[in-house]
Image (cartoon, rainbow, N blue to C red):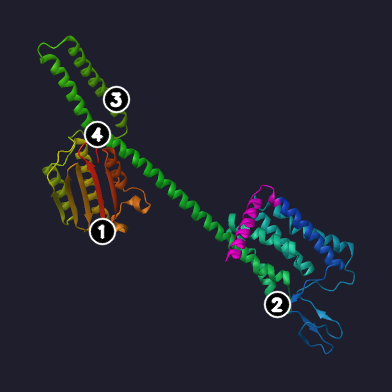
Amino acid sequence: MERAHDRRGRWATWADRGRRIAATPHAPAVAAALLASLAVAESIAHLTGALPAYPLIGETVSVPAGEAITHPGGVPADGTIARPGGPPPDPNPGAPSLLVASGLLGLATTLPVAIVRARPAVAAVAVSAAGLLSLAAFHTLTAAGVTAQLICCYRLGRTGSQPLAVLLTVPFVLVAVAGTALGGTGVLTLLAACLAPAAALAGIARRAQTRAADDDAARRAIADTLLEHTARGERARIARELHDVVAHHISMVAVQAETARLTTPGMPATGAERLSAIGDTARAALTEMRRLLGVLREDTGAETADRRPQPGLGLGELNELIDESRDASGTSVRLILTGPPVPLGPGVELAAYRIVQEALTNARRHAPGAAVDVELHYTGDGLHLTIRDNGPGPATAAPYEERGLPAAPYGGHGLSGMRERAAAVGGELHAGPATGGGFLVEARLPARDGELG
């Protein structure tokens, strides 16, 4: 097991090195030069007899009686061999003209690899044409030429015209089939006929894989951007709502300080100055908050004009929210109150109301027809809020971002908004599939901002 793992690791290392080398700018030119030198040397060696001719597949021989039989591997008595798929007999195989022609064809079948990255179609057409010319003139291919053909077909299928990549392999397939039917096909011709279509299809498959990966990365980038903008908008909305609560308290501080300064008889001058300073500080804080709120309200459209009082957890407001959800969904929505009510801070009440509102919206949108229970359990130090639906589970009940999708296009923004609201007042929120089915949202909120035990 360890040896197999080590072998896979070594193969992966070498494959990674090969990919890095192939990606260098000069890789095509270097490959073309290497293949060209090999092709010329191979062609000349075959013509001069220094390198034996490649074997034929399905070779036939002629016997004295004139009958053609399949060559079983031995040589007939008269030594006559018919080679319709291999090089024809030549009384002068080392003639200079043949050597020059063979060398030029070797260059033509390999040098176009130098431009395969910039002009894959031109390179593939040139290599294929030179290969067919080599078959017509010498009835054979070179190993370097076949390698160049595979490189060009793969590159064309990956980055160029896919139909052309497949079309250029057809002549080699036809030559191989015809040669086999007529009596014999060179082994390199057969390899080109088999491997060239495979290389073209591999390039096409690689292009599809790369395109799918790019599309997936683009979708994820768009989703991340949408989620980021959603979170920013939700934080700005929370800040605007909390501003109304905080501004009310600061206004009360300013009013009470001024009232105490003016109505307290016999107050020392120092005390009056301090109360006046408190009032001035409170008013300065209000001015600064309004300035910041103006920045937050930029580009908010109609929402800027919405100056209605912020909701809370009063029975009237909760019942109105429950009735609205029940009317919109047409299903059962129950409100359950347990424990003696504990006075909650305005910010906590607002956060709890918005969490209930958002959870009901999610249940209505993602688990249509599901019954929902909203439970407010007052504890000694705050509120335990539970919203549960009996839908089919997280696949439909969970908000969009729990399924890797952008937030839904409505006023609230799913779990991210609810978590932001709970955290803003010092609470915590958990959401997920409920035991037995459905979706569960639980929040623990302190009685006062930031006081959760």
Distance from Cα at disc 1 to Cα at disc 4:
32 Å
Callout 1: few (<14), some (14-19), or many (20+) C-alpha neighbours within 10 Å? many
Q: Given contact means CB atoms under 8 Å apart, are the residues at marks 4 and 2 in contact?
A: no
- Label 2 SS: helix
Estimate the x, y position of residue 65 in percent, counting from the top left.
Answer: 83, 90
Which of the 4 quarters of the picture holds residue 315?
Answer: top left
Residue interval drawn in magenta:
1-28
Which of the two discs, 2 and 1, labels the residue nearer the N terminus? 2
In this figure, which residue is indicated by the disc labeled 1?
A: 438
Which of the two discs, 4 and 2, labels the residue nearer the N terminus? 2
Q: Nearer the viewer, mark 2 or mark 1?
A: 1
Mark identifier at residue 180: 2
* Quadrant holding the C terminus: top left
In this figure, which residue is indicated by the disc labeled 3?
A: 291
Residue type at mark 2: give it. Thr
Left/right of residue 56 with respect to residue 409 in the rendered view: right
Mark identifier at residue 367: none
Residue type at mark 3: give it. Arg
In this figure, which residue is indicated by the disc labeled 4?
A: 242
| Vertical relation: 267 (above or below) 291 | above
- Label 4 SS: helix
Distance from Cα at disc 2 to Cα at disc 1:
67 Å
Estimate the x, y position of residue 202 in percent, counting from the top left.
Answer: 59, 62
Q: Given contact means CB atoms under 8 Å apart, are the residues at marks 3 and 2 in contact?
A: no
Q: Nearer the viewer, mark 4 or mark 2?
A: 4
